[in-house]
Image (spheres, rainbow, N blue to C red):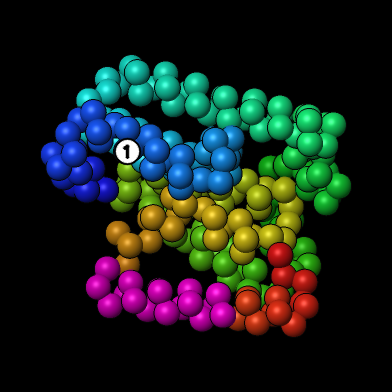
Amino acid sequence: MKNVLLRSRRALGPRRYAAAMVVGAFVTTRSLVMAATHGGAARMGILAQGWKAAGGTARSRTLAGAALSLAGVAGFAFWWHFAQGDALAFLHVQAFHHRRLSVLGPMKAFLAFDVDPDYYLVSLASLYVAARMIRRTPIWMWTTAAFLVLLPIATGTLQAMIRYQAANVPLICGVPPLARGRKFWWVVAGCAALMALEAYLFGKGIGHF
């Protein structure tokens, strides 16, 4: 990633590169709000790398990252206020599905046996990759990857883990450094097969979400 950013900077120049970096960071997400909420930590990390290559100082990157993250959460609540009349609807809907964060949440999730085996496969694989990423990838990558794996599990269920981890950008970005050469293509083949299975089950009306 760093090499790509540096080469792009030399090709475009600092000013054009900075503009392209900002546009690209926000194009990769569905909205400005989602840039700092769902998977936004990874995008903020990539944006920070681009800012560094474009000449931003460490202090300005830290302040901008904090401001963007807080603005994203505030903007999300603001949107829900007008869309649903409840600024915290994204929290209340989790309560409706009986999700409660707890220390014993991961244990309850794995012992509940209320989901199909593919949910266990994806959850265990995600935990394994997140653990292997520690000290093998940048700190922002493995911390955000682990957070996005553990957060839904800590609610006491593995429901929707396939969908959540499919959008776990830092976790996905951490796979290539861990599986090189032929191993990487085996991982790609396995993911493609799982994706085909999930599409088939969804098409049959089986409640995979």
Give the magenta range: 180-196
Q: Amino acid at mark 1?
A: Ala
- Helix, strand or loop under label 1: helix
Residue shown at the point (29%, 31%) measured from the top left: 18
Q: Nearer the viewer, residue 27 or 180?
A: 27
Residue at image x 56%, y 80%?
196
199 relative to 134 in the view: left or right: right
Q: Quadrant of residue 120?
A: bottom right
Q: Is residue 138 left or right of residue 105?
A: left
In which quadrant of the rendered view does residue 111 lie?
Answer: bottom right
Residue under the point 61% across and 56% down: 164
Magenta stretch, main secondary structure class? helix
Mark 1 neighbour density, 10 Å: few (under 14) some (14–19) many (20 or more): some
Which of 135 and 62 lies nearest the eye of the viewer? 62
Q: Position of residue 107 (x, y in %)?
A: 69, 55
x 62%, y 61%: residue? 163
Residue 190: say if magenta.
Answer: yes
* Residue 174 seen by the camera: yes
Q: Is residue 156 above or below residue 117?
A: above
Q: Please tell me how many numbered marks the rendered image carries.
A: 1
Residue of label 1:
20
Tell me if residue 185 is in the magenta stretch: yes
Horizontal and vertical percent position of residue 12: 18, 39
Query: Can you see residue 45?
Result: no
Looking at the picture, how far across and down is residue 100, in whole percent?
Answer: 77, 44
- Can you give x and y, in whole percent of width and height, for residue 200 in the image? 65, 82
Query: In the picture provided, is 68 more to the left or to the right than 24?
Result: right
Q: Residue furthest left?
A: 10
Q: From the image, which quarter does the C terminus lie in?
A: bottom right
